[in-house]
Amino acid sequence: MKKFISVILALLLILSQLTTVVLADEDDDRDRFDRSTLMPIFSIENSQIPSGDAGSTMTLSFNLKNTGYQAKNVVITPEFTAENNPFTVSSLTTSETIPQINGNSSVNVKFKLAIAPNAMPGSYPIKLNFRFKNAYDYDGTHEEIVYVRVTGRSTPPKIMIKEVSTNPKEIGPGGSARVSLILENKGSIDARDISVSLEGLKSSEGFYVGSGSNVAYVNRLGGHAVGAVVFDLKAANNIRRGSHEIGVKLSYKDSQRNTLEDVQNIYINVGGKSGTSSNIQIDNLDYPTTGIRPGNDFLLGFDLVNNGKLEASNIIVKVESGDPSVVPKTASIKKINLLEADKSEHLTFIFTPTKDAETRNYPINISIEYEDELNQGTENKYLLTQYVGIYVNNPKEDEEDSPKGKPKLIIDKYNFEPSIVKAGENFTMNLSFFNTNKEKAVKNIKIFLTADEKTDPNGNSGGGNVFTPVESSNTFYIDSIPPKGRVEKSIKMFTVPDAQAKTYTITANFEYEDSKGEEYTATELIGVPVIQQSKLEIGELNIPPEAFAGEATPISVEFYNTGKVTLYNMMVKLEGDFPTENGNYYVGNFEVGNSEYFEGMIIPQEPGEITGTLVFTYEDSSGETIEVKEDFTLNVMEPMPMDEFPEDMPPEEARGIKKLFKSKWFWITIILIGAGFGGFKFYKKRKEKGMALDE
């Protein structure tokens, strides 16, 4: 037993000496080189010179690459060495600290720089000073020069109200609405501490604050940037219908902390629909759609429906023909004393064309005047109007259209270039004038175009005509048109930018003579379909400067409907040679003045540069599908390496342990100890067995 214990102790002594030898070899390896030389090698990767306007705040962003050994506690401090330097660091600290940068890796570094308002355009150098420690805690320093460009002289902030929208779009007496104001900074210098307040609110007869406050605040609005504020307003029960002016007071500060103030006006329209008022509508309109012959009666009927919340009273319904050739055979005016909410009443009227009625379309006007408890006893009655067209076919005119009959001049066809007219653009209208008479010519023909419908008096066009001739007059002169002959004319027209998206009517008025000098007049109607151009504003894509293979990377962006029409069935999706998460986003109907936010994830598979596309698709007011693409590029790095040992273990100990595990003497000693322990157990069992036999 004593001999065995002596053997074990000898083996342990050998093992301890072996570990000392291995670590001593490690020390010898360390002495072969100077650890202070194992330094990182820094370089700056920058594809282009960053730039910013004078008086603005910009981000200096660059990728710092280390192609050498590991660096720790890297402190980067910018030094502005240029004469008349226009930059200052716009943050709480003037330095950026990076805890660790491994070899053959990159990190992104960002500094917020404020550019002086009086900065001259040009490129300015900025020196970056680096202080760091290597893996063995030896100090090191480094310097790099980067250049920043100032692109222009500054202009003071000037905030303007760009768009006004209400939700819901139609506001009635007693109704509530969320009013959104889109603000735009026309200057290049940031506007700060912005206060937006509504003035002239009257709870008794106008708009007043429904919830919240009449003052909204915006912390900052960058140069040429767009922001929004929202107010919750409520209309008084006795508010008059029509346009209401509200003053908006804007107060903000420039870069020198000077206070700037301005008052601008917005206009909110109060219409017939309301959450609490009555609302009369015409439903199930029934009238003949085929030709009616003179002397034959026809029926015009419809349902009068109250879709509001209050009962309507003193309802006067008038159904009148605009031409004496179509006359009523029943009373054309009817009065209904009361129509409760969610109730309806059916009305019918009988008309007949006279024998003198010509073959053409005759308009019949339906007008409804009523009141409820909100406007009872006032002059502001609710008024609803609607037109229907009745086509009269007089076969006698065909008999009169002979050599002895009068010549008739018509527009037999017309078209537009482009086929659908866009608001704010020119279009060409091509007209074909046709003489229907087989024998008689027409001469001294004067044709002039008129459009009765005006634009919104509160819009930019101030109630002017929707269409305006360009480089010409709206009048044509044609010397003569032979029998069964035609003459084609073209006129270039301009459509005002704030024209509503719908079909407008232009009237062509004819004045002409036959061969005997007898004068005639006639009119023809031309339908012009107008659409508002859609406008999608896409903000700056938020893309990380680099990504790692196999890791999800976010791509986000904010976008706005800055046009005047709703964008229908809007979809946003990420496209590229990579898997995505939340890569599709269905917006639906994107209302005017609204903003939305999209964020999706891409998962790069391989290191290197990859490209992708953010695709926006929607349908405009004409039903045409519009596609807008935003391309982006992303630098993909190798996956981050995993350390074999804990980060807090000293490098010398980690390397010594690795070398110990690789030593053959270490494993021989372990085997000998195991064999000795096994022999001791065997010896002990044999001895115990022998003692048992002796007993």
Image (tube, grey):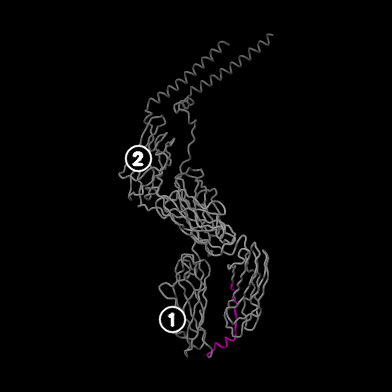
Identify the element where label 1 is drawn: strand
Crowding near the residue tagged with mark 1, few <14, some 14–19, many ≥20 C-alpha atoms within 10 Å: some
**In the rendered structure, does residue 351 fall within the stretch colored magenta?**
no
How far across and down, in percent of the image, does residue 167 sit? 56, 58
Q: Which residue is mark 2?
A: 79
Q: Nearer the viewer, residue 180 or 611?
A: 180
> Disc 1 to disc 2, how far (Cα)?
77 Å
**In the rendered structure, does residue 401 fall within the stretch colored magenta?**
yes
Q: Nearer the viewer, residue 426 or 484?
A: 426
Q: How many marks?
A: 2
Q: Is residue 322 left or right of residue 45?
A: right
Q: Nearer the viewer, residue 203 or 329?
A: 203
Give the magenta range: 386-403
How far across and down, in percent of the image, does residue 628 sit? 48, 57
State the image quarter where residue 398 is shown: bottom right
Q: Amino acid at mark 1?
A: Tyr
Identify the element where label 2 is drawn: strand
Q: Is residue 272 left or right of residue 126?
A: right
Q: Amino acid at mark 2?
A: Glu
Quarter in which the N terminus is drawn: top right
Q: Which residue is mark 1?
A: 477
Rendered position, 371 above or below 330: above
Which comes before the other along the chain, label 1 or label 2? 2
- Looking at this rendering, what residue extends furthest in the left direction? 83
- Looking at this rendering, what residue extends furthest in the top direction? 694
How far across and down, in percent of the image, does residue 334 sit? 65, 74
Q: Is residue 295 at least partly visible in the picture? A: yes
